[in-house]
Amino acid sequence: MNAEVASVEERKQNLKGMGTARRRVEDARFVQGKGNYVDDIKLPGMLFGDFVRSPYAHARIKSVNKEAALAVPGVKAVLTADDLKPVNLAWMPTLAGDVQMVLADGKVLFQGQEVAFVVADDRYAASDAAELVEVEYEELPVLVDPFKAMDPDAPVLREDLEGKTEGAHGPRRHHNHIFTWEVGDQDGTERALADAEIVAKEKITYQRVHPCPLETAGCVASMDKVNGHLTLWGTFQAPHAVRTVASLISTIPEHKIRVISPDIGGGFGNKVGVYPGYICSVVASIVLGVPVKWIEDRIENLQSTAFARDYHMTGEISATRDGRITGLKCHVLADHGGFDACADPTKFPAGFFNICTGSYDIPVAHVSVDGVYTNKAPGGVAYRCSFRVTEASYFIERMMDVLARKLEMDPAELRIKNFIKKEQFPYTSALGWEYDSGDYHTAMEKALETVKYKALRDEQKANREAFARGETRSLMGVGVGFFTEIVGAGPIKNCDILGLGMFDSCEIRVHPTGSAIARLGTISQGQGHATTFAQILASEIGIPADQITVEEGDTDTAPYGLGTYGSRSTPVAGAATAMAGRKIKAKAQMIAAWLLEVHDDDVEFDVDRFVVKGAPERFKTMAEVAFAAYNNVPPGLEPGLEAVSYYDPPNMTYPFGAYVCVVDIDVDTGVTDIRRFYALDDCGTRINPMIIEGQVHGGLTEALAIAMGQEISYDEMGNVKGASLMDFFLPTAVETPVWETDFTVTPSPHHPIGAKGVGESPNVGGVSAFSNAVNDAFAHLGLTHTQMPHDHWRVWKTAERLGITA
Amino acid sequence: MIPGSFEYHRPESVDGAIALLNEHGDEARLLAGGHSLIPMMKLRMAVPSHIVDLQAIDSLHGISEDGGELVIGALTTQHEVLISDLLARKCPIIPEAAALIADPQVRYCGTIGGNVANGDPGNDMPAIMQALGARFRAVGPNGSRDIAARDYYEAAYFTELEENEVLTQIRIPTPAAGHGAAYEKQKRKIGDYATAAAAVILTVESGRCTSASIALTNVASTPLYAEAAAGALVGTDLGADAVDTAVRLAEEITEPTSDGRGPADFRTHVAGIMVRRAIARAQKNAG
């Protein structure tokens, strides 16, 4: 294309900037199987580690005998807690202010807990030897039910905390109590409930699930004993934070640690925390002087790495008889497992659960959360949601339906009646958040119109009558869900992890020939950062996205950042990218003015060039400016064209959306057919519509999985049930319905480009829409709430309880 | 998920395989498509020292008709079953059931012989073979013998097959022309074993059921041949009373375990629903 004659539109298209459905640049390597994941890394002399894990949920370790294992040919070492103690690594800090055993120190607290680490020449020898490590256990009483955790005679799980009455988040009142977290106006809320015309109450459990990324966790640790440098490749969603933590706990100076996140096969929160496998690999590499690789298998991943949810919520919502909400109260019993390894900002032990007033103008509210220990795996990560936001959204969206039943009001109408109005933004919620922007009425109206909501309700009425007459054994349900997310953690004033403020960063170098590289503190696990961040920059600095390389994940080259989770990359690193781009543009403008021999203020940016105001035929393209930056800059200006931005967001962003799900339930088999799912998302400014659509598809599929089948459950002995993909529900294309996506655009007023983040919205909004639909199918028979997952047998049991099974 | 170490053998004849079985006794296991054995080995629930791979034995492959019998070689894959014209014409319930097994990748490797031989109660083909009255040909050091599918299964993973025998063929009396058959399977997702499944084969003349057989999958430690349930249909016009009786009799013989697919009472109930639906569809397919 001739730059001089191309139209503005052509020049914009050439950039493939924001708003373009640009194809993902990552996909060429992924679809060819040419990605570079941690298990693809092969180093000379590399050894392999494997764990001996506890078969018991709670037991004392009487002895560990390594002899037979050490006799296996190829075995180089067997580590136990006693071997880690001299280097002070038998325990490690968790992200939640607790400590966690790296290898079992005297006892085990959950089935699958790491007891010993075997290192051998290959995986086979390591696995053979792990079978031969003899561990003598003495079984202890097992605590599975979180409601019994704080019974006076409940077993003592954490002997290391004996006598410790002060935890990381305030006083502990029982040996299995971790914290109590309270927000809101308790007295005011109690008064509102007491004075209310209508109060609806419900117990809502969000079951324990697991993010189950396609790639399990793993790492390769390589200690160079000559120069004292440690290189650690791993499945890290926050490589820079891992480097800092590694330095703090290993005492290796931070400049001698290099952490690299290569391609990552999905994270969904599961790869935010630090796992014993990382520590053991590092120690083994230090001891043995060669690289050590550790890769989990699927069962290990499901059984022992970070779970999500496991929130037992009791809610009360009050309203006037005509459906105006007057108050909301919620108590949560949070099952954290054997160690508190939640991944939340330090000051938020229950994450942002206090977003649970949702999209509604609720005058007064109170939330209290009790975290307790049980004999289950630790975790509590945000599984494709911002911190505990999906629990909050599920809670309020179920409560809205429960209240609607009680009021005998249409659930969509109740929502519309209580929405925060467009003109109320920025809106401060009763639980303290300042919502940046929203237009809920427009989104809901568009959704209801598109799905022809009224007609669906008419059809449902006819279906119910036909069912009553015995003409069909299928019941139709319509689930309406409206969510408000809180993402983009976050402002340093209230968000940090282990003292590290949750800013993020971007560093840009423009090369002499007009191409560029941008490095960020985040790390893609499938989000398509290399595609979208280049688009932000293309629009900001006028260099085509195809000429911008985006690089992340190597702490030696990328600027420091807090990583990718909680839909924070676009709100925080995306903002840093725009801000760094603007620094580039400012310098470029000076250079352009110099080349055009006019004053700085007399040139203006025009897509991919600077033009002299009022004389558009006089211009310098960004490529020309880039070259000049290296040989002809104005006097007093440094050569080069680089910039870096560390962005501390002034506020979170609040994406929202309206979802409608239509199901048909076969009451004889409990099989639920998802007839239709419509998802309208408002994520503010849309950078790449195709990537947004892909994110929504993925998030809805995970929401389907959670609502309809996923569960990590335990028997009374604390044995994990179904920790393999035979049982754990990972939907295939066959189980996944066709998704209908839609959008409105309400930009964030405080974000440089108005973007809000989208990766997690569909999971946050989706789960309640599915669940509401299933509950709605039985609503006319008196059902107000039934627990997830809505798998075949539970749905059938619901039908049985309601007396409609044959 | 790493199996123990083992010796790998690849005989080219059934005799060669039997010789290896004789030599290594219970330390040897036969490998067909590998989709039952290898997962068990990865979990170290099976730790055989010798694997005898049957893939290279040509005589174990293929589908043919021999007199009044359909003969399927044990190493025939589920995919080959699925695309067989002969089976589609003469015995469509077999390809119908094959299509419900796992996913295409599994079906390209998994074999019908492996599916019926090892006594996994979750497998689909055993109930199909019981409903069809199939016989399994077992060849051992002393020659061959045929074992009726209805007599073959003793308990989960325990069968009539001797340690030194190879199941070489499945022999199915060619079903009567115009028979109606159906396999109804409820599962949680692709790749899952049945919550419950039912195979029904009927012949119907002038509206009356002249013969019936019913078998159930994954609602006991073995497949279940529901003889009494089928008997309740014969001689009837397949009206509501007869079907209700058959469903009740089928439900009565189930002994499912409670697992992730649901509690036992639910799985028994689903078995009844599957029988009911399979009867209705088989009736429609008849004639």
Image: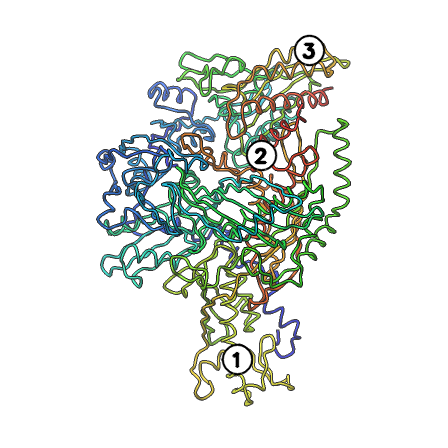
Q: Position of residue B3 (x, y in %)?
A: 37, 34
**Residues under labels 2 and 3: Cα distance?**
36 Å
Q: Position of residue A705 (x, y in %)?
A: 56, 41
Q: Nearer the viewer, residue A337 or A243?
A: A337
Question: Is B61 drawn above or below residue B244 in the view shown?
Answer: below
* Chain for disc number 3: B
Residue A415 is situated, as x and y percent measured from the top left of the image, at 67, 50
Q: Are marks 2 and 1 in contact (CB under 8 Å)?
A: no
Mark 1 — residue?
Answer: A624
Q: Is residue A437 visible?
A: yes
Distance of label 1 from label 3 (alpha carbons): 90 Å
Residue assigned mark 3: B234
Select label 1 or label 3 by which is in front.
3
What's the amino acid at mark 3?
Val
Q: Which residue is mark 2?
A: A791
**Residue type at tag 1:** Glu
**Residue A698 appears in the figure:** no
State which quadrant residue A767 falls in.
top right
Q: Nearer the viewer, residue A287 or A318?
A: A318
Give the Cα distance between marks 2 and 1: 62 Å
Tell me the subunit letter for badge 2.
Answer: A
Pinpoint the chain carrying mark 1. A
Residue ID at (53%, 59%): A25
Q: Is residue A685 left or right of residue A501?
A: right
The local secondary structure at tag 3 comes to loop
| The C terminus of chain A, quarter of image | top right
